[in-house]
Amino acid sequence: MENFDNAIHYGPNDAGASTLSIAIVVLTILLGSWLFGALYGIIANYFKGK
């Protein structure tokens, strides 16, 4: 009898990650990077004007 190998029988739901949680993480990363770029642009324009 063969032993059960977790590396072979592993799926995304084994970690408790649902489609909704993955989508929320991806959207949060995209929104965060967009906000960082927008804030950087505002600060850069402020100092360029001075």
Image (cartoon, rainbow, N blue to C red):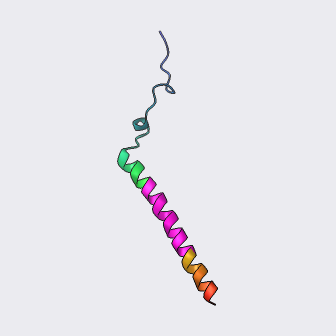
> Which residue is at the front of the view, 44 or 18?
44
46, above or below 24, in the image: below
Residue 35 drawn at (x, y percent): 49, 69
Q: Is residue 16 left or right of residue 29?
A: left
Main secondary structure found in the magenta portion: helix
In the image, is 37 to the left or to the right of 19?
A: right
Q: Residue at x 61, y 88 (%)?
A: 49
Query: Residue at image x 41%, y 43%?
Result: 17
x, y (%) of residue 26?
Answer: 45, 54
Given residues 25 and 38, the one toward you in this image is 38
Residue 22, placed above or below residue 40: above
Determine the image quadrant of residue 18: top left
Q: Residue at x 43, y 57 (%)?
A: 27
**Residue 33 located within the stretch drawn in magenta:** yes
Residue 42 location (% of width, % of height): 54, 79
Q: How many marks?
A: 0
Give residue 45's position: percent from left, percent from top. Answer: 58, 82
For residue 36, what is the image quadrant?
bottom right
User: Looking at the picture, does residue 5 appear above or below residue 33?
Assistant: above
Q: Quadrant of the C terminus?
A: bottom right
Instruction: Using the image as rendered, state which of residue 17 and residue 26 is in the foreground.
Output: 26
Q: Which residues are magenta?
A: 26-40
Residue 41 within the magenta-colored segment of the rendering: no
